[in-house]
Amino acid sequence: MSTGWSLWVMFLVVLNLGITFGLFLWAPRAKIPTRPDGTTGHVWAHGTILEGLKNLPMWWIVFSGAMFAAAFIYLFLFPGFGNHKGALGWTSHGQLAREVAANEAKLDPLLDRFRLYTVEQLAGDPQARQMGKVLFEDNCAACHQRSGKGNILVGAPNLTDGDWLYGGTGKDITTSIHDGRSGVMPPWASLGADNVKNLAQYVLSLSGAPHDAAKAAAAKPLFSTCAACHGAEGKGNPALGAPNLTDHVWLYGGTPADIEQTIGNGRQGHMPSWSTRLSEDQIHVIAAYVYHLSHPVDEDQP
C-alpha cells in the first residue's frame, strides 16, 4: 500500500472510531427534555402509546465499551491501520501459505501412491476418485456440469457415455486435460441452403435417426467433402477430434435444426490447457476420475 493510501485509511479509521467513541461518551450524558409525567412528548399509535425516557442499562454501556477496547486491541495486534503490520506479524498470505503447506504435507503420501498406477488402474481407487471428484467440480464442472454429462449449449462433451472425440484411454484423457484441445468445424454455407438441409438429412441417416430419404440420397455425393475429417462411413477421426456421426451422440444437439446450424455456420470448440493451473499429480487424479465416469464398473482398488 502506498503512503498516500495508508494515510487515507488511517484517517478514515481515526475519524470513524473518533465519531463513534464521541457519541458513546456523549449519549449517556445528553439531556433530553421531558414532561412532568416522564414522557418525551412523542406519541405513537394514534395517541395510545407515549414515549418514555429511561437511561441506558449499565450492561449495554459496559458491552459497548468492551467493543471499543477490542477494536483498539485488534488494530494493535493485526493489520488494519494503514501500513501498520500488527504486533503479531500476521498476514492473510502467510496464513494461506501455511494452510497450503499443511494440506500438501497430508496429501503427499497419498499422491506418492497414486503415481505408481496408470489412469485406468487409479480409476478403481476410492480415495483417488474422491479427490478427483473434488478437483473436477472445482475446475471442470462449469462446462461439463458436476455430473460430467456435458452441455450442448457450449459444446462440452458428455464424459459419461464412452464416446470420445480424441480417444478415451488414460493417456488420451490426460493429454486433453494437460494440453487442451481445439476443434474447428468449418462453415459450409457456401454449398447453398438446400444442400445444407440435404446434408443434415444425410447425417441423420448415418445414425438411423428419422430423416427424409430423398434429401439424404441427394446429399450423399456431397458428403465426400465431409469424409476428409469424419471418414467415408462417418465414424469420425480421434486424431482430428472429428465426431462419430453414426452413434446418436451429438456435441451441439441432434435435431435437424441443430445439424443444419453446425453444417452451415460451423463450430469452434476449445478445451483449455490446465497445465498452468493444476499440478501433474492433480491432472493424473482428474484423468482417473473422468475415466471412471464412463467405466463405473471398474471398482477394484489397486
Image (cartoon, helix red, strand yellow):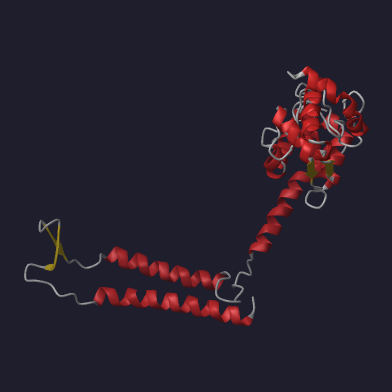
Q: Could you tell me if residue 117 is visible in this image?
A: no
* Residue under the image location 52 percent in, 72 percent down: 75
Q: Is residue 11 above or below residue 231?
A: below
Q: Please name whichever residue, 3 or 185, is drawn nearer the observer in this view of the structure.
A: 185
29 left or right, relative to 269: left
Seen from this angle, which residue lies furthest left? 36
Quarter of the image where one finds residue 145: top right
* Residue under the image location 81 percent in, 24 percent down: 202
258 left or right, relative to 122: left
**Residue 140 position within the rendered picture, expressed as x and y whole percent measured from the top left:** 72, 41
Q: Is residue 23 above or below residue 133?
A: below
**Residue 102 position within the rendered picture, expressed as x and y whole percent measured from the top left:** 71, 52
Q: Is residue 120 above or below residue 63?
A: above
Q: Please name whichever residue, 257 or 189, is drawn nearer the observer in this view of the structure.
A: 189
58 left or right, relative to 80: left
Number of marks in picture: 0
**Residue 142 position within the rendered picture, expressed as x and y whole percent measured from the top left:** 68, 42
* Residue under the image location 72 percent in, 28 percent down: 256
Q: Quadrant of the C terminus?
A: top right
Q: Please name whichever residue, 256 or 85, is drawn nearer the observer in this view of the structure.
A: 256
**Residue 79 position within the rendered picture, expressed as x and y whole percent measured from the top left:** 58, 70
Q: Quadrant of the N terminus?
A: bottom right
Quarter of the image where one finds residue 49: bottom left
Q: Could you tell me if residue 220 is visible in this image?
A: yes
